[in-house]
Image (tube, rainbow, N blue to C red):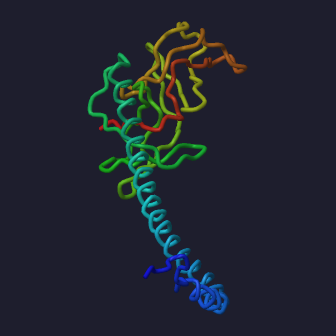
Amino acid sequence: MQLDFSRSRPRRWRRLLPLALAALLLALPRLAALVPAAVVLADRAIGAHYTARLDTLQRENFALHRRLAESADALAENRALRQLVNSGRTVSGAVPARVTTRRADGFTLACPGAATGQSVLDAGGRYAGSVTAVEGDCCTVTFAATAGLCGAYAGLVTPGQWVLTGLPADCALAAGDIVTTPGGDWLGTLTGTPATGTDGLTACTTLTDTANLWDTVYFVKK
């Protein structure tokens, strides 16, 4: 007796396929409702990660900017010190001080330990003003008129104006003569021969090689 294998058994999955499709169609609305919630949850998780990372980067950026600002002050002070050393003028007992605020008639320095009356020099060792007030670790520098000595003669010089006035009309001074304060601080040199004023009794002239009043670092002379 022979067996007939020409007809195969009906496969079980073919009978289950309609049921699976029906179940999927029934579940589609629920799946569609779950998708937005899943997207929101994923967005929150990803957003929280990036927000935390952004906060970290912002803190690091702030710290780097603060370190850069501190380094900029130190670099400015180093440049000023090098310029002062190479200026060729003898300056001793001078302490560097950074400008904190500026005014039309002077500026304020961060200069702990300063005292009124002390001379303030620029990075080239030239007289820029004097300390007129001290408050805490800051001192006020004013562009006030000071005596200018040139040879055997004396006049007045105001930082920022840089004109030597009040010289005798018959003074024997010439361009290039050095002008200093009574304390020996450099004020500049005569631009030309002093010209006699309208009163016929006094003479004046401008100065050159004078202090830079726009530096960021100055030196308070002790």
Instruction: Give the percent coordinates (x, y) of residue 15.
Output: 58, 88
Q: Is residue 190 or residue 72 the one in the foreground? A: 72
Instruction: Give the percent coordinates (x, y) of residue 34.
Output: 60, 86
Is residue 93 rendered to the left or right of residue 202? Answer: left
Q: Up-down: is 111 above or below 84?
A: below
Which residue occupies 46% across, 49% down?
140
Instruction: Give the percent coordinates (x, y) of residue 168.
Output: 57, 16
Q: Is residue 160 or residue 212 the one in the foreground? A: 212
Residue situated furthest front in the rendering: 1
**Quarter that holds the C terminus:** top left
Q: Up-down: is 187 above or below 50?
A: above
Residue situated furthest left in the rendering: 93
Q: Quadrant of residue 159?
A: top right
Q: Quadrant of residue 219?
A: top left
Which residue occupies 51% across, 19% down?
209
Q: Up-down: is 122 above or below 206?
A: below
Badge count: 0
Q: Is residue 156 or residue 210 the one in the foreground? A: 210
Which residue occupies 35% across, 25% down?
82
Q: Is residue 93 or residue 110 the one in the foreground? A: 110
Q: Quadrant of residue 63?
A: bottom left
Instruction: Give the percent coordinates (x, y) of residue 194.
Output: 61, 13
**Quarter that holds the N terminus:** bottom left
Which residue occupies 49% across, 27% down?
211
Residue situated furthest right in the rendering: 198
